Image (spheres, helix red, strand yellow):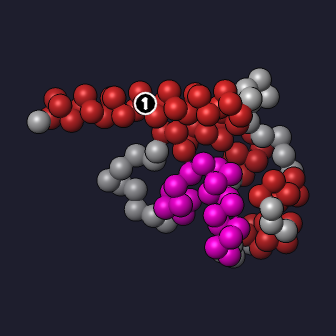
Amino acid sequence: MDAARSQAGLSWRQVAKELGVSASTISRMAQGLRPDVTAFAAMTTWLRMPAEDFYANVNRSDREPDLVASLGPLLRARSDLTEKDVSYLEDVIASAARRFRSEREEVTD
């Protein structure tokens, strides 16, 4: 979350405003406390990240993080891209990732 915040050039207070949560909620999270369900949903939506990828302690050894979820915050942080541009790029990247995965599965079958 901090990487997405800093790349977007936002303060924590600005992130809280974009998420629709209080600054104290963000502060409590920085202290290691878990957010409530509403704040958690807002954060994962803002990050465009599957909820299970938000937690650092999830066992991910069997799979890579979702490519679009990983790149989404970087794309949104760019000032030269509109939300429509970001959405289009995410669709293109997701489509390419599905094709690559499909081609790999055909080879292993």
Three-letter code for the amino acid on which mark 1 is drawn? Ser
Instruction: Give the left or right position of residue 69, taking residue 1 as reference.
Output: left
Q: Residue furthest left?
A: 109
Front one among 96 and 4: 96
Image point 36% across, 34% down: which residue?
Answer: 98
Answer with the quarter of the image where residue 28 lies.
bottom right
Residue 12 in view: no
Q: Is residue 22 magenta?
A: no
**Residue lying at 61% horizontally and 34% vertically, measured from the top left:** 87
Report crowding for label 1: few under 14, some 14 to 19, many 20 or more residues within 10 A (C-alpha): few
In the image, the segment drawn in magenta is 36-55
Residue linked to disc 1:
95
Residue 8 is left or right of residue 61, and the answer is: right
Q: How many marks?
A: 1
Work out whether residue 6 can be spotted.
yes
Label 1, secondary structure: give it. helix
Percent coordinates x, y for residue 106 in the rendering: 17, 31
Q: Is residue 47 magenta?
A: yes
- Residue in view at x 55 percent, y 33 percent: 90
20 vs 75: above or below: below
Q: As displayed, is residue 106 above or below residue 28?
A: above
